[in-house]
Amino acid sequence: MAGLLRKSFGAVLLAALALCIYLSQKHLDSRRRIDFIDRSAVFLPRGNVLKALSMGYRGIVADWLWIQSVIYFGRRVMDEENPYYLYALYGGNKEKIQAARNHHEAYHRHGEAYSAGLHGHAYDREHLQREEAFLSSLERPDSAMALPVPPDSVFLLDENLRRSLYQFNNRGLIDGVYPLLDRVTTVDPHFVHPYIFGGVYAMFETGRLRESLDLLEKGRRQNPDRWEFPFYLGWLYWMYKGEMQKTHDYLIEAVQKKGCPAYVTSLMAGLSKNMKRSDFTRLYLEGLLESSTDPQLIESIQNALDQLKAFDSADSSSKGS
Amino acid sequence: MSHFAIQTSRLRKVYKGELGQKDYTGLEGLDLDIPAGEVFAFLGPNGAGKTTTIKLLTRLLKPSSGSVTINGVSNTSHHSMERVGYLSEQPNIYGYLTAREFLDFIGKLFGLDPGVRKKRIDGLIELVGLKDRDRTLIRGFSRGMTQRLGMAQALMNEPDILILDEPLSNLDPVGRKDMRDIILGLKAEKKTLFFSSHILHDAEIVADRVGILDHGRLVQTGTLQELTGSGLKTIEIVCSIPQAGESVLGLNRDRIVRQGDRTLTWTDDMESAQVILEKILRSGGKVFSVTPQRKSLEDLFISRIRG
Amino acid sequence: MKWPAIASLTYKETIRNRILINILLFAVALIGLSLVIGEWSLGEQAKVIKDFGLSAMSLFGLLIAIFIGIRLMVQELEQKTLYLVASKPVRRWEILFGKFAGLSMTLLLNVILMLLALWAVDWVIEKRIDFQLAAAVVLIYVEILLIVAFALFFSSLMSPTLAAVATLAVFIAGHLSPILRDYVQLRPGTGLKGLYMAIYYVIPNLENLNLKMAVVEHLERPPHAVEMGILYGVLYLSFVLIATCMIFEKKDLK
């Protein structure tokens, strides 16, 4: 009898404790602060130091740094899922923010329902509301930390928006993602995606062309067999600098690499034609063909030459007719 | 208040079989009644279940069914151990303590006051002969010294009941003598002693009653007298006789052992022994010794186990 | 109440244990090393030192929990020293709790020593004592105790090696669990929300006990973060300890 009493007492005690644990966790979660102002990532040791410290675990350390980069970036990227962006965008106007959120949510939900066949899951607004409340309570930015707004940002049309984003960018230090990515790529130079993320996607948000080019160049140096690097470098030069010559040179380099997609080869051929450099390109590639022994390289060059020829014959056939 | 110091009722222990193996019954329905002041020896071959029984008595194991009562109190309560002293088989004691520190700790477990503890520790150290090693780490103790210390901790609470698992095994002759003296001393103080052993000789010297355990079952209990009877087994005669004299004596062929010029023969009772002795002397031989062999516990043991 | 006797015995045992001293020296060395590593960062040397120091403490705790926490019970059972204790008029749970309490005392001493070392190293750079570090250290201590509780729990159920792996797994899961919660909140349409949240609540959220970053960077904290963290930690480790006591109560000491 005593044993049974003991057992049930123990079970009741455990159940009561479990309930208390659950309640205290909920309480803790409700009071959470988003640590938005974390500059910590930028003040990591230099890349080569991190590399040395990782010892045998470079892969994991690079992964972790990469995740940190993504989180860092994601917190500061400016789209409707980022409540800070909404706040900055609408100058703290609650109705506008709510409308934007509803719109985004409906879109989001519709998209999800479409793909998953699910309907009507309650959207947890509490979380965003709290973040908004926190933001409202923020003080004025520290002017010493002011950074200029990137000149390449094409969406900076509205002056109010510009000022808000100035403030936002001030706090956000989104450009801090570049030192992070630099560290990731130093620790693991063959982890390709961070290079491209920094060179292309982050470029959209930050407009930091110099850093993007440097990052992609680093990737190109460390991974000479990847087609992606010369390709995106070419793209950056074309998109943001308009230097067609360099773009073309990079594309020619890209098509020689293994795994280069057909559309890149077409792009190269098309560009050669537009720039009236087809003959030069052909001669250059044929020269390469003669001197190379690597079967993969030979195949790639042959593809490129075929493409060039196709573009030429298409042109001549249209001319002819 | 029951006058039984230790009582078990249908005490049973089944060990659950590990993955795919059968359950193993370590002890099968044991009924024991040990009155206060009795010295009870618990005998049996290795694996019989002696240690299992002792662990069931001292709350180290939980019975599968049945009950144990110590001084009338069920041993499901830890209070039942207040008046009990226990020494495990080949005890292991914390190496990082000194003998004094360890005994002090044991004293605390019994809820003794510091003054009482100190006095008893002094006495016990003396009793078990650890006087010049009482402040060295137990890590350096020999097996014999650890056993002595184990005995000391069993006596820390001046118990009425002592439960000892193989107290005299694994000791050198000096150690065994000391331990035996301690046990006899306890017996003289009318303590209840319950001990297990596979050395039957020790039981013969000390025990009032004996229980024989085999394969988890109690196969026999009783006093030594009851078990071995008046117990004359044989009478051994060592003599020297001329070779030819064997037939004269009418000795059984397979009851003769020769070694050098000595002959050993034996017979079953006093009368035939007298007859043989006369024949030896008359034939001119010499008698060197006449030794009655009592039926020993060992013989009983072996016959019981084998039978 | 007999557990204080067992606690002071365990305290003696762990203090005299060489492994503990080695790991402590290692942690203190790490704290000292942070002076060098701080040189490499782009300024913010104090921050690196504090990060390193607090991380070393947390790591120390994990190692102790695994090496000593598991050994605490396992060694008694394997070497059968427990026989002479469990056969005394002592309740089983008092034995377990006494061991836990004893180790907690030892760990408290160690954590205080490490905090002093950290303050000393920090003073070399900043020429002042950052008392806020104590807040983070209190929670680190609670975290260590919680891990020790888990170590005791697992070692009463399985072999020492498995118990070590399980304890480590709890540590890792405990630090990753907030990801479940965040994921559910950011992706509200997910169908497994209930399951994820249930897992989240069951796994001990060790981030509740993690104020390292907040303290080092003087970030704004929710009110009563320290008190709530302590409460959560104490509640959870009580749960684990009680469960372990119940298991130990039934255990056959073969």
Image (cartoon, coloured by chain):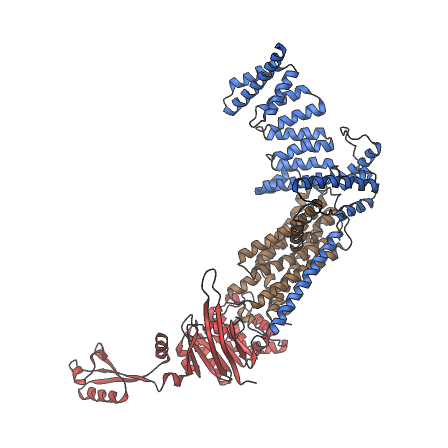
- At which x and y percent is residue B270? 27, 88
Give the farthest residue toward the left. Answer: B244
- At which x and y percent is residue B132? 52, 72
> Is residue C235 visible to us here?
yes
Tint of chain A: blue
Q: Quadrant of residue C12?
A: bottom right
Q: Is C25 displayed left or right of A166 in the figure?
A: left
- At which x and y percent is residue B250? 18, 84
Q: Reply above or below: B283 against A93.
A: below
Q: Is B233 displayed left or right of A252 in the figure?
A: left
Tint of chain C: brown
Q: Quadrant of residue B203?
A: bottom left
> Is residue A42 visible to us here?
no
Say which of A71 and C135 sits in front: A71
- For the image shown, how many numbered marks are present on the structure? 0
> Residue sitting at 50 percent across and 24 percent down?
A295
Q: Quadrant of the C terminus of chain B?
A: bottom left
Say which of A120 and C239 sits in front: A120
User: In the image, which lettered chain appears red?
Assistant: B
Q: Reply above or below: B27 against A51.
A: below
Q: Quadrant of the N terminus of chain B?
A: bottom right
> Residue sitting at 61 percent across and 24 percent down?
A264
- At which x and y percent is residue B187? 48, 83
